[in-house]
Amino acid sequence: MRRENTWPKVELYGPTLTETWKALYDRFGLDFESSLDRSQPQDYWQRHLYFNAGWFFHESPARFGNRFLAWAKQIRDDPPAELVCQELFPWLDQIALPLVIHSFGGGRPGPELDALDGSATCHYRTLPLLYARESDRAVAVLETVAKDKALRPTLRDWAPVKAMVYQNKGRKARALFDRARLPHREQVIRNTLKREGLWLR
């Protein structure tokens, strides 16, 4: 799974990562202990269910979506006390998602889903990030789709596509990075793109 430990940010005087997540599980009556990956150290972010929100599966999109919306609103409008110092935006989907997945009996994807966030799909989030770090194939697919005469009238009205694809700013962004030696932290990539005026959302 392509993800980083973006939430929660642990404050010097607490609560700990574990206390923060447990408060959320308790709020919704979920078994916190069964969600943990005990092969990971205590208070290490990967010990907890945490997803990039790029993809997930469920037998009923309506049931899943309704619960997701209700719980996200509850977290937003009435967060547990342990979240008092935490930023909820833009992380609200990543806060609610593991809770909802766990409530339906789901968990971490196994190796049979390795192609997601890999060779079968590309979770890029923003076009500047796609150009900066994704494969040549991902860029080629994007640019081929953008040239389709049926799609072009719609796509060219979306500012990021217009700038990154049709005005070739994506190629400028791509030239800033060696994909064999990308920075380990996404923040470094974002800051470089911002500095060059190539960060579009």
Image (spheres, helix red, strand yellow):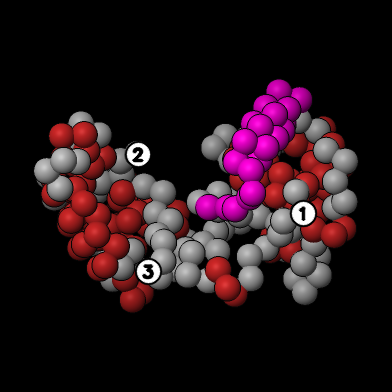
Nearest the eye: 125 or 173: 125
* Residue 153 occupies quadrant: top left
Q: CA distance from mark 2 to mark 1?
A: 34 Å
Q: Main secondary structure of the magenta part?
A: helix
Comparing marks 3 and 2, which lies closer to the viewer? 2
Residue annotated with mark 1: 105
Q: Residues within 10 Å of mark 2 (few under 14, many from 20)?
A: few
Q: Secondary structure at mark 3?
A: loop
Q: Image height check: is 124 above or below 116?
A: above
Residue annotated with mark 3: 182
Q: In the image, 12: left or right of 180?
A: right
Query: Type of residue at label 3?
Result: Leu
Residue annotated with mark 2: 201
Q: Position of residue 10 (x, y in %)?
A: 71, 49
Which label number is shown at residue 94? none
Q: Secondary structure at mark 2?
A: loop
Query: Type of residue at label 2?
Result: Arg
In which quadrant of the rendered image does the C terminus lie? top left
Comparing marks 2 and 1, which lies closer to the viewer? 1
Q: Position of residue 129 (x, y in %)?
A: 35, 54
